[in-house]
Amino acid sequence: MTVRLFALLIGLLAGPAHAAGWDVAELMKALAANGGGRVRFVETRHLAILDQPLSTTGELVYRAPARLERHTETPVRESMVLDGDTLTLTRDGKTHSLRLRDYPEIAALIASIRATLAGDRKTLERSYALSLSGNATQWALDLLPSDPAVAKVVLRISISGSRGEVRAVDILQADGDRSEMRIEPVPR
């Protein structure tokens, strides 16, 4: 199963296409055709409360249209599974679940990743303005919050990739914290 995945990981008012026929609609079509898969990730988080960046590694699994799993291997083993409206976190043998509808700002952030992977433009446009640059082989999609509640949490989500594959997700939070995730296919 070819993986054209993730994170982060998203904003919609299509910018000018740089190749004939390449626009947000074409990107969403390419992403939707993927259907899901498994990838490796390396994420670097820059947090105000830490003196140095925090790096995590692991695996992401996406099953269209609504299941997204993040299995972190280092520095601490944990898993987060988003299935429909339920987010479940497992760490140190303990499991915690929450319903996204009770946390609308977090739900919008998570929906941005899942909707991008699914090629679901309509869902993205509920909370974000989209801007696409590049071409089919090297594109960048910026998501800028259009919902004031979402803007309290995140300033920008930048997703880049090639064709229907996501290769990077960068998130700039409203508090100045940021994360950079790089994504690679699982070796066969």
Image (cartoon, rainbow, N blue to C red):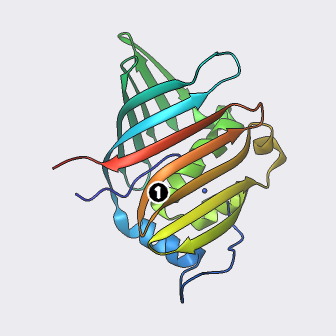
Residue 182 x %, y %: 45, 44
Q: Which residue is disc 1 drawn over?
A: 117
Of 133 and 103, the residue lying toward us: 133
Number of marks in the rendered image: 1
Of 94 and 132, the residue lying toward us: 132
Look at label 1 and name its amino acid: Leu
Residue 37 x %, y %: 30, 52
Outermost residue, front direction?
A: 52
* Residue at image point 71% right, 57% down: 128
Label 1 Cα neighbours within 10 Å, binned few <14 / some 14-19 / many ≥20: many
Of 53 and 23, the residue lying toward us: 53
Q: Secondary structure at mark 1?
A: helix
Whether residue 155 sits left or right of residue 24 in the image: it is right
Q: On screen, 83 above or below 47?
A: below
* Residue at image point 52% right, 58% down: 160
* Residue at image point 25% right, 46% down: 186
> The N terminus is located in which quarter?
bottom left
